[in-house]
């Protein structure tokens, strides 16, 4: 069985985001870019399933510009067998990404697709669900535990009320939550081995994917600075302060 893994590049989660002075986006020049944390978890889970003998091949997929190759090498160094780079200079919205994955599914015929539940740049949390709908296959989102037996996946999901366990027939789409696993540390020998692993480059235009943007971002702005807090002595003073501000 093949496992297809989405592997998006985002601004590193440790970086303090800065908005451009003209409000057209966030500053990325000279900023550290890394794998989306949820996608690292997705890749780690795919590698563990391969190590258990459930799958024979793990393929990482990235959608982005020419310099995305270095990012995909990171996924190969983690342990993926090969990578697919869908080359495009344009930002990709969730529905377009789902349509790209569907084309790759038709080409690769994987038994399982694992995606991060969301990317930390747009926080959309949509691609996995859209892909399952387009593919007409079961989905199991927010996974905190995954077990594969034969042609069935048993997934423990994190939901508002606690945990939910569902079964899904394969092929299926699974999206990963934070507590599913802890991604492995990449060692130097693995980085060297990754240089010889294949990366297939596919032009976005050759996939015949509809790429209309459904959302248009008109302006970016940093969060407003919080005003200094006010100390009150008791509940009566708190009520008076709220009334003065017109909040009561």
Image (tube, rainbow, N blue to C red):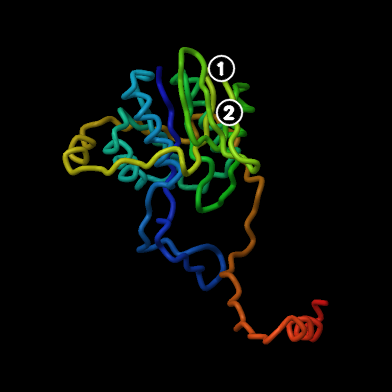
Can you give x and y, in whole percent of width and height, for residue 182 in the image? 37, 42
Q: Identify the residue under disc 2.
A: 165
Choose top left, top right, bottom left or bottom right for residue 39.
Answer: top left
> Which residue appears at 58% of the width and 77% of the height?
225
- Nearer-the-camera pick, 236 or 55: 236
Tell how many labels: 2
Left or right of 159? Residue 188 is: left
Can you give x and y, in whole percent of width and height, for residue 204 in the image? 48, 36
Against 59, is 37 above or below? below
Q: Are marks 2 and 1 in contact (CB under 8 Å)?
A: no
Observer-side mark, 2 or 1, equals 2
Choose top left, top right, bottom left or bottom right for residue 62.
Answer: top left
- Nearer-the-camera pick, 107 or 60: 60
Can you give x and y, in whole percent of width and height, for residue 57 in the image? 34, 22
Q: Secondary structure at mark 2?
A: strand
Against 102, is 243 above or below? below
10 Å crowding of disc 1: few (<14), some (14-19), many (20+)? some
> Which residue appears at 61% of the width and 74% of the height?
224
Work out which quarter of the rendered image holds the N terminus and state it. top left
Q: Secondary structure at mark 1?
A: strand
> Which residue appears at 35% of the width and 30% of the height?
47
Left or right of 35? Residue 139 is: right
> Which residue appears at 34% of the width and 18% of the height?
53
* Residue 102 in sight in this render: no
Choose top left, top right, bottom left or bottom right for residue 198.
Answer: top left
10 Å crowding of disc 2: few (<14), some (14-19), many (20+)? some
Left or right of 102? Residue 181 is: left
Against 86, is 18 above or below? below
Q: Identify the residue under disc 1.
A: 169
- Nearer-the-camera pick, 62 or 67: 62
How far, Cα to Cα, is label 2 from label 1?
14 Å
């Amino acid at each position: 069985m093949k496992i297809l893994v989405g592997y998006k590049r985002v601004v590193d989660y440790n970086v303090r985001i800065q908005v451009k002075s003209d409000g057209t986006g966030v500053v990325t020049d000279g900023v550290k870019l890394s794998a989306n944390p949820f996608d690292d978890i997705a890749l780690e889970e795919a590698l563990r399933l391969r190590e258990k003998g459930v799958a024979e091949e793990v393929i990482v997929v990235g959608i982005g510009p020419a310099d995305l190759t270095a990012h995909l090498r990171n996924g190969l160094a983690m342990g993926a067998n090969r990578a697919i780079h869908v080359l495009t200079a344009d930002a990709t919205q969730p529905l377009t990404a789902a349509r790209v994955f569907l084309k790759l599914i038709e080409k690769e015929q994987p038994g399982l697709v694992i995606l991060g539940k969301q990317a930390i740049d747009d926080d959309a949390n949509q691609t996995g669900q859209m892909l399952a709908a387009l593919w007409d296959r079961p989905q199991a989102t927010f996974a905190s535990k995954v077990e594969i037996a034969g042609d069935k996946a048993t997934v423990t999901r994190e939901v508002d009320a606690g945990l939910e366990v569902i079964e899904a027939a394969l092929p299926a789409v699974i999206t990963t939550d934070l507590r599913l696993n802890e991604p492995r540390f990449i060692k130097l020998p693995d980085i060297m081995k990754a240089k010889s692993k294949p990366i297939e480059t596919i032009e976005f235009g050759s996939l015949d994917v509809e790429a209309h943007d459904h959302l248009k971002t008109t302006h970016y702005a940093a969060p407003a600075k919080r005003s200094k807090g006010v100390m009150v002595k008791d509940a009566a003073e708190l009520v008076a302060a709220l009334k003065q501000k017109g909040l009561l």
